[in-house]
Image (tube, rainbow, N blue to C red):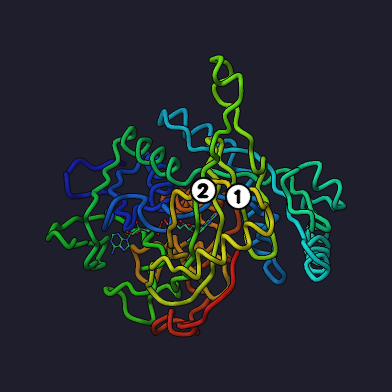
Amino acid sequence: MATQDEDRFDVLIAGGGVIGLACAWRALQRGLSVCVLERDRAGSGASDVAAGMLAPVGEASWGEEGLIGLNLAAHRLWPEFAAELEAESGVDPGFWQVGALHVALDRDETEELQRRHRLHREHGLDSEWLDAAACRELEPGLAPSVAAGVLAPHEAVADPRSLCAALLAAVAERGGVVDEGSEVASAEFDRGVTVRTSGERELRGGTLLLATGSDAGRTPWLEPAERPPVRPVKGEIVTLRERRRARPEDFAGAGPDRRERVCSRIVVGDRLYIVPRPDGRLLIGATVEELGFDTTVTAGGVHELLREGYRTLPDIAEMELVEVRAGLRPGTPDNSPLIGQGAREGLMIATGHYRNGVLQAPATAAAVAALLVGEEPPFETEPFRPDRHRASMGGDSSRAAAGARGGTR
Ligand SMILES: Cc1cc2nc3c(=O)[nH]c(=O)nc-3n(C[C@H](O)[C@H](O)[C@H](O)COP(=O)(O)OP(=O)(O)OC[C@H]3O[C@@H](n4cnc5c(N)ncnc54)[C@H](O)[C@@H]3O)c2cc1C
């Protein structure tokens, strides 16, 4: 099925984030020829900022049954996806089944956590109620005010930067092309697709996959009514690093990596999450704001995250501050992704993954690869059809919520 011509491919992919790259890898495995066109550097969008939680329990919310099902299916795919990816690429995507502890710090938060726990039970999610002592036994660094908690032992993380590096290597290994610094400027659909890039390159493809993340809602070469209803939802995130505490054995040359950890699993509070990495980094995220295409890191955002982090795990005050970033989640009206046929023949869509693009990447890529070769996707994609919001399409999808400031999480 692979074509030979240097500018002809079975599949052209606009956007080299975690979604575009995962779809490219799975399509290549099906024997399709693939070229990913990435405006900047592959993996430099939201995928570069994400915490990488693979957390179907933490993300479960009321009235989102379809999304809960997708998140669970994606979570089940992750261990095999990570192992296969590492075997093909030689790069560890940072998958770590670390578990998550959700904590409540006062009476209101305890009531809210109880409601969430009931929701978990209604959906058969793996979530255990703990009293304050049991929480502190698991995480001795928790603030004394911790009143109760919920343990979700199977929540996991991936390191999104390592994941993108692994996907890039796997795509290259399979003969895929990734053209960085190449923005898709126009696309014409006529028995396939002709794409022109900002660099005046012209490419032909059988299918164009739109995987441009939060930019998808402003795709200029689609009519307003044909554009996916995606809006940017800003999130700021802070990275800290454990400082090694010198111990006698360090000076004796023993034990190379004896860190005292501030926490040993994901800790989730009412207004934040704290994600440890095996190398001693700790991410505190994330603010949620609807401000259009703004990725400015603000003093207020960082203050909020550090204040909430300190309120939950006071020892973070001792850590080194190494990075603050802001990224744009691709939000949709119902918080669920858009996966499947686009408004033109030859156009396929995989975007709108909002807060769960890292988690959902394996499932999305499996579905897209199956659709590309005319097979049934491995899960029901009907609830994620890109045209399900047709009535709300047609206009600037960031308009509805522009200017709104949210909290954290
Ligand atoms: C603060 C924060 C925390 C998050 N935490 C998590 C988490 O813990 N777990 C989780 O699962 N998800 C998380 N997410 C969400 C996750 O980051 C996204 O859902 C996911 O990265 C979306 O991937 P994507 O490939 O669709 O988009 P992106 O990574 O944004 O990639 C889109 C790419 O398209 C490129 N592009 C745009 N326009 C064009 C064009 N015209 N031509 C060519 N290229 C173009 C961009 O340069 C970009 O590289 C978080 C997001 C944020 C901001």
User: Residue 390 versus residue 262: which sits nearer the camera?
Assistant: 262
* Residue 371, horizontal then vertical, whole percent: 46, 54
- Residue 377 visible? The answer is no
Residue found at x 38% / y 40%: 165
Query: Can residue 220 be seen?
Result: yes
Q: Quarter of the image for the N terminus: give it.
A: top left
> Under tag 1, what secondary structure?
helix
Image marks 1 and 2: residues in contact by CB distance under 8 Å:
yes
Reply above or below: 296 against 366: below
The residue wearing badge 1 is 316
Write down which quadrant ligand 1 falls in. bottom left
Residue at label 2? 240
Question: Helix or strand or loop: what does disc 2 sit on?
Answer: strand
x then y, percent, for residue 77: 60, 43
Which residue does the image show at 37% across and 72% down from the upper left? 293
Q: Nearer the viewer, residue 305 or 387?
A: 305
Q: Quick one: label 1 or label 2, which is nearer the N terminus?
A: 2
Q: Residue at x 24, y 66 (%)?
A: 187
Q: Quadrant of the C terminus?
A: bottom right
x and y percentages locating residue 68 in the rendered image: 67, 60
